[in-house]
Amino acid sequence: MRTVITGGAGFVGSHLCERFLAEGHEVVCVDNLLTGLERNIAHLRNRPDFSFVLHNISEPLTIDGPVDAVLHFASPASPADYLAHPIPTLKVGALGTHNALGLAKAKNARFLLASTSEIYGDPEVHPQREDYWGHVNPIGPRGCYDEAKRFAEAITMAYHRYHGVSTRIVRIFNTYGPRMRLNDGRVLPAFMGQVLRGEPLTVFGEGQQTRSFCYVDDLVDGIYRLLLSDEHLPVNIGNPVEITVLELAREIIALVPGTRSTIDYRPLPQDDPKRRRPDITRARELLGWEPKIDRADGLRRTLEFFRSVI
C-alpha cells in the first residue's frame, strides 16, 4: 500500500509514518513545517519507501502514481500553536481537508481525518460519547481550532455520502510521548520542562480540571485499526483513565527526586474544558482496541525523551 500522511513531520504524524512503514506501506509525508519538525523524520529520510514533500496542504496537492490511503493530520494542535496561528488553523481545517479529500477521491483511496476531543468543547456530558454534539464557543479564542475540526468532520461526511469516498474519522483525546515539543503549550510537556529545569509547575485555577492521557503508541495502534475497518462514523481514541491536572503535576514532580519544583497557581484560561474523558466503547467493540501502556510507564518514557532535548 502507498499512504499519504499530511502533517507527517508532527508529533503524532511522525509516529504514524513509522508505524505504516513497519506495516509494509510506502509513505509519502507531506508537511509545511509550521509546527512539525524535520528532526522527527530525519531517521526516515534515506529509506526508499519514504518520501517527504514540503507543502502546505491548504494549497492544492498533486501526488504522482497510485495512492491507497490519505491520512489528514496537518494542523496546529496545541492551544499555543493555534492561538498563534488562528487563520492557518482554520484554513487547514477547511481548505486543507478539502484538498486532502480531493486527493483521496481522485485516487480512489481511503481517507482518515484526525479530529479531536475539542469537538466536544467544554462538555456537559461525561464521559464524552461520539453521539454527543458538544458545547463549543464558536467565537471564543479556541474557536479557530474547534470549529475548524467540526467543519472538517462535516465535509468528510459530505464526501462520504455524496461522492462515496471511503472515509474514517478519529476523535483524538490528549496524547503524549516522545517528539512532543517542550514549548507547544500543552500541559504535560509544560510540566515536564518545568520540573527538569527545577521551576514551579504552572497549574491553572485550582487544578481540579480533568484530562485523560493516552500514550502515543496506543493512539497510533487505534488509528491503524480504524483505517483498516469499515467504520465511517467518528470513533474516540484515548485513555479513559481520568486524572486532575493537579494530580498530574504531583506525579511528574515525583518522577524527579530532589527537585525544587513546587506548584504555581494561575487564573483559569477562557473556555478551558473542565472535564475530559473519552467513552471508548465503540473503539473496543468495532476495533478491538483499548490502551495498553499505563500512565506511570508512559510518563517515564516521555520524561527520558525530554531529558535528551532540554
Image (spheres, rainbow, N blue to C red):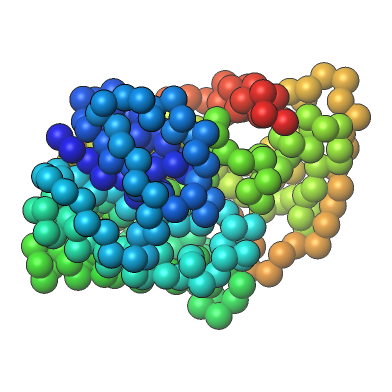
Q: Which residue is situated farthest in the right direction here?
A: 260
Q: Answer left or right for 281 relative to 268.
A: left
Residue 45, position in %: x, y?
A: 38, 30
Residue 276, position in %: x, y?
A: 54, 52
Please determine whether, in this image, residue 40 is positioned above or below residue 68.
Answer: above
Determine the residue positioned at 84% across, 52% down. 265
Q: Quadrant of the C terminus?
A: top right
Determine the residue positioned at 86% across, 32% down. 198
Q: Quadrant of the N terminus?
A: top left
Q: Answer left or right for 280 relative to 34.
A: left
Residue 243, position in %: x, y?
A: 62, 41
140 vs 76, nearest the viewer? 76
Does the image show residue 124?
no
Q: Answer left or right for 249 relative to 53.
A: right
200 vs 105, nearest the viewer? 105
Residue 46, position in %: x, y?
A: 36, 25
Within the image, what quadrant is residue 65 found in?
Answer: top left
Please determine whether, in this image, residue 247 is positioned above or below residue 271.
Answer: above
Please determine whether, in this image, residue 157 is positioned above or below residue 238.
Answer: below
Q: How many marks?
A: 0
99 vs 257, nearest the viewer? 99
Q: Which residue is situated farthest in the bottom direction here?
A: 139
Please determine whether, in this image, residue 38 is positioned above or below residue 309.
Answer: below
Within the image, what quadrant is residue 268 found in?
Answer: bottom right
Does the image show residue 61?
yes
Determine the residue positioned at 66% across, 51% down. 185
Determine the residue positioned at 22% across, 56% down. 62
